[in-house]
Amino acid sequence: MSTVNPYRPRDIRHNPWFVVGLLWFCGFFNYADRQAVYSVFPALQLEFGLSKSHLGAIGMSFMVVYALMAPLAGYVVDGRPRNGMIVLGLGFWSIVCAGTAMARNFTQLLIFRAAEGLGESFYFPASMSMLSDYHTKGTRSRAMGLHQTSVYLGTIGGGALAGWLGEKYGWRTPFWGLGIIGMGYAVLLWFLLIEPARSGTTEAEILIAPVQGSLGSRIITIVSIPSAVFLLAAFGCANFVAMSLLTWLPMFVYEKFALSLTNAAITGTVFLQAGSVVGALSGGWLADLAARRTGGRMRVQALALLLAAPCVFQAGIASTVLGLGIALVGIGLTKGVYDSNIFASLFDVVPAEVRGTAAGLMNTVGWSLGSLAPLFVGIAGDLYGLSTAIGSTAAVYLLGSCFALIASLVVRPAWK
């Protein structure tokens, strides 16, 4: 794998938008693989005799490992070729995805989900750091927003495909299919994905000198920036709600509206994720405009979370599929606007040389809190019903909005 300065393009592989396209498909598999299990929760519950708390623990196992590994993954990414990290991560988590089909009990499901979290923890620090070097401040939110649509369409694809295949051929089938396709794409990506020069370095310097500073010192650098701390807190809140919805919406629809496994999976993913696609594309464009003023991206995020909160509450109390669908589209639109700026906002305030570590730390905070969501909502669902459990997470979105707004008020001059 070669290294190239993205501002001296020689063939299409060096084109910044072509790189977005390559990573888009990688992001698609990243989320399709992790979302598939939620769509077959009813089938797992039936085969293994699991409670909602057990199902919540399955979701939590992925998130805990993902969160714990994220800072180390980001630190490694800051000192290694990111294209190699992406390819190896994709290959590993695809193997684990296929292996999930061989699980024969609750414990094995936990182990496979945890292992998938290990493989996927390297992807976002590496891909976001790479995109930040291919795209300058003027196009960064649009590039990351476009990439973010892979998350939503991967969630739709993985969720809907798993629901349909699970109903027709058994819950193991989608894991085999997604895993094998992902392994094939990893081979293709090996030949196409080019490592760019990192911002602030020359092409000759890239990857020759070792990373300066320990992981601890890099984390201290990041948390010493007040706006970065509040952005971390905002993402923690946002991801808590997001993981509540991703984990439990298919089951919520299945139980409340008595739909089939396929229709529940589609309803629980398509409305939310389709809205998110539109939100991410428009949010990236809006934030790149707002970024002309210091803290602009963060104010866009704060407004998005504020508007998302009542939509989450409405989703919890919806009495019809149509009402739920409208609420989910609203959540998706606002969530997409927020998501398109998660890393772009952070990269506006941290030094370029610690972007991988910063992205890893962001994932640690977000997924640490997010990992509590499946179990929290599962327990609350057993006690009070999923409607109440899901609707109550609107308050967490409001808290996240406050954190994002504070971040915009204390922001320092942006790093280039």
Image (tube, helix red, strand yellow):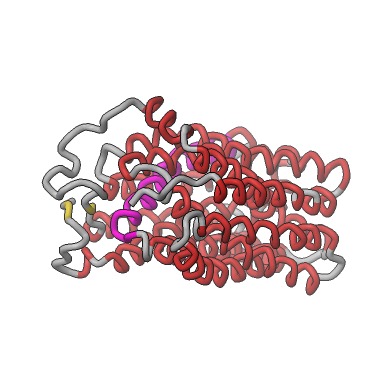
> Is 286 within the magenta?
no
Residue 298 appearing in the image: yes
Q: How many marks?
A: 0
Given residues 159 and 365, the one toward you in this image is: 365
The range drawn in magenta is 108-136
Q: Position of residue 94 (x, y in %)?
A: 42, 49
Left or right: where does residue 308 sit relative to residue 16? Answer: right
Given residues 172 and 252, the one toward you in this image is: 252
Q: Position of residue 331 (x, y in %)?
A: 68, 63
Left or right: where does residue 382 sit relative to residue 282? Answer: right
What residue is rendered at 54% in x and 51% in y?
A: 34
Q: Position of residue 195 (x, y in %)?
A: 23, 52
Quadrant of residue 319 within the rendered picture: bottom right
What residue is rendered at 27% in x and 37% in y?
A: 79
Left or right: where does residue 53 sit relative to residue 294? Answer: right
Given residues 170 and 200, the one toward you in this image is: 200
Given residues 230 and 93, the one toward you in this image is: 230
- Magenta segment's dominant SS is helix
What residue is rendered at 33% in x and 35% in y?
A: 76
What residue is rendered at 74% in x and 66% in y?
A: 260
> Is 118 within the magenta?
yes
Residue 95 appearing in the image: no
Q: Position of residue 111 (x, y in %)?
A: 54, 34
